[in-house]
Image: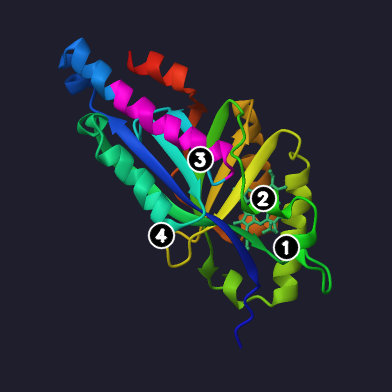
């Protein structure tokens, strides 16, 4: 018998990673670069207005290493709005300098593992803020996709609801030790993308990601039951610091 836990969904999310073709960028005239930057700033102004009206949220990050240069993390009420946000960039003069090395499509998800009795989770304080999150303005971001394992004795999907609830309780207790330093946004992607969840973490100290994730590796929900995809880590950009980066 299916023993799935009920989930509540919030905004859709697209983690839109872009690589900059630096040789092409560097070979352009300054007026071509200025045109491209101003087209990008126009889009970012529109996204800022969306966030100010409470109809979504956007974070822009400078990604470290070879996997990508930029991340546009967009959270919106509808898939159409996300498609439009992606198209805005694709159709702008800036797009000839971009490739898309990775992207992740998912939807903000809360599970009811730790909700007691007949309580309406939407009535609990903080639920709406978690379903429709204004992305934290911390310095650093860490994104990775993950699965729950299905291997021999370590098959998450063959555990009873109570066994899974117990393990998620342990996970939550460990996570709360870091709650003052790390904010997590869990997005579900079963049927939407290649992994089952996206994990987006925010902190002001990069080492808090390392310490939390290392400690969580020893917690049963992760130690026995989780597999992970690529980690993409970066620093938050404002419009001004993005202009400096490109300048
Ligand atoms: C910052 C710390 C932190 C805290 C406080 C926290 C708490 C909680 C709670 C209370 C709950 C359950 C209710 C809900 O809200 O859904 C969850 C749920 C979840 N988590 Fe978590 N998590 C954290 C952090 C945190 C991390 C670092 C990871 C990645 C795992 C790792 O090893 O790299 C993670 C994963 C998840 C997932 C995939 C789910 C959904 C599982 C499912 O089967 O549905 N999570 N999480």
Q: Is residue 221 left or right of residue 123?
A: left
Whether the residues at callouts 4 and 1 have beta carbons within 8 Å, the answer is no
- In percent of width and height, residue 110 lies at 65, 60
Q: Is residue 58 visible?
A: no
Label 2 vs label 1, nearer the camera: 2
Q: Main secondary structure of the magenta part?
A: helix
Q: Residue under label 3, please give it.
A: 50
- In percent of width and height, residue 1 lies at 61, 88
Whether the residues at callouts 2 and 3 have beta carbons within 8 Å, the answer is no
Label 3 vs label 1, nearer the camera: 3
Mark 2 or mark 1: whose residue is earlier in sequence: 2
Q: Secondary structure at mark 2?
A: helix
Mark 3 or mark 4: whose residue is earlier in sequence: 3
Mark 2 or mark 4: whose residue is earlier in sequence: 2
Q: Is residue 213 above or below residue 186?
A: above
Q: Residue under label 4, please give it.
A: 193
Residue drawn 24% across and 34% down? 95
Mark number displayed over residue 167: 1
In front of the other: 98 or 155? 98
Residue 54 quadrant: top right
Residue drawn 63% across and 65% down? 8
In the rendered image, residue 49 lying in the magenta stretch gets the answer yes
Q: Secondary structure at mark 3?
A: helix
Which stretch is magenta?
37-54
Q: Residue under label 2, please give it.
A: 130
């Amino acid at each position: 018998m299916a023993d799935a836990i009920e989930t509540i969904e919030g905004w859709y999310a697209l983690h839109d990673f872009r690589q900059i073709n630096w040789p092409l960028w560097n070979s352009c005239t300054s007026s071509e670069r200025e045109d491209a930057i101003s087209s990008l700033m126009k889009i970012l102004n529109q996204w800022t207005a969306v966030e100010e009206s409470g109809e979504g949220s956007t974070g822009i990050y400078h990604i470290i290493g070879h996997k990508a240069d930029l991340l546009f993390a967009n959270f919106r009420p509808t898939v159409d709005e996300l498609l439009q946000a992606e198209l805005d960039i694709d159709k702008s003069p800036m797009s000839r300098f971009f490739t898309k090395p990775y992207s992740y499509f998912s939807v903000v998800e809360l599970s009811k593992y730790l909700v007691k009795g007949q309580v309406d989770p939407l009535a609990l304080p903080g639920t709406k803020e978690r379903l429709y999150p204004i992305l934290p303005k911390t310095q650093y971001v860490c994104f990775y996709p993950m699965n729950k394992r299905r291997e021999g004795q370590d098959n998450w999907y063959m555990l009873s609801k109570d066994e899974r609830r117990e393990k998620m309780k342990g996970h939550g207790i460990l996570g709360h030790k870091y709650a003052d330093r790390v904010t997590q946004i869990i997005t579900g992607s079963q049927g939407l993308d290649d992994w089952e969840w996206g994990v987006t973490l925010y902190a002001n100290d990069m080492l808090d990601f390392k310490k939390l994730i290392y400690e969580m590796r020893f917690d049963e929900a992760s130690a026995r039951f989780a597999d992970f995809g690529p980690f993409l880590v970066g620093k938050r950009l404002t419009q001004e610091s993005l202009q400096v980066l490109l300048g």
